[in-house]
Amino acid sequence: MSKTLDTKDVFGIYEQNIISSFATINREVPKYHQSITDLQHQCIQTCENTMKSVLSVQKEIVNKAGINANIPEVALNTIRDTNDGINKVYSVQNQIVQTALDATKQNIQTFNDNAKAFADLNKNIIHSWINVFTPRNN
């Protein structure tokens, strides 16, 4: 529930809307994030379970059919090396994304830190202009 300020000017109403909107955003974003995380986990788990089930069925069929499932050592090494390479690429990709996200967060924080100073500078400029162009009664 948002707290309502007793105001009738446009800036007071605007401020109330900002406060209300960001209170809603701050309340809802964690729920959204949790839902997306849960969905992602469920999708990953479903993929893993599906692959394990398919492998189990294939293994059973090959065994019951008496098919030789052995492959040469060179092929085994190639498969293992390829999988290790894929996992390393995934880890490096994740590190790059994390670094980019950290840099983005830092840039946003810098902007946030400087926003008030920028607003104060603009206020000072406006006050200077107003003082120059406002007639004075002497």
Image (cartoon, helix red, strand yellow):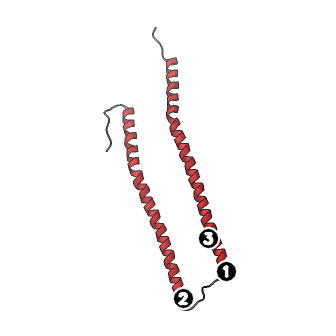
Q: Nearer the viewer, residue 29 or 6?
A: 29
Res. 98 mark: none
**Which residue is tagged 3?**
83
Real-space Cα separation, disc 3 to disc 1, in angstroms: 15 Å
Q: Residue at x 47, y 12 (%)?
A: 136
Real-space Cα separation, disc 3 to disc 2, in angstroms: 25 Å
Which quarter of the figure has residue 95? bottom right
Q: Secondary structure at mark 3?
A: helix
Depth-wise, is mark 2 or mark 1 nearer the camera? 1
Q: Secondary structure at mark 1?
A: helix
Toward the top, the furthest residue is 138
Res. 73 mark: 1
Question: Few, some or many C-alpha atoms within 10 Å of disc 2 (few <14, some 14-19, many ≥20)?
Answer: few
Question: Residue 56 appears at what percent x and percent y?
Answer: 50, 81
Task: Name the residue type under label 2.
Answer: Asn
Question: Residue 63 appears at what percent x and percent y?
Answer: 54, 88
Real-space Cα separation, disc 2 to disc 1, in angstroms: 20 Å
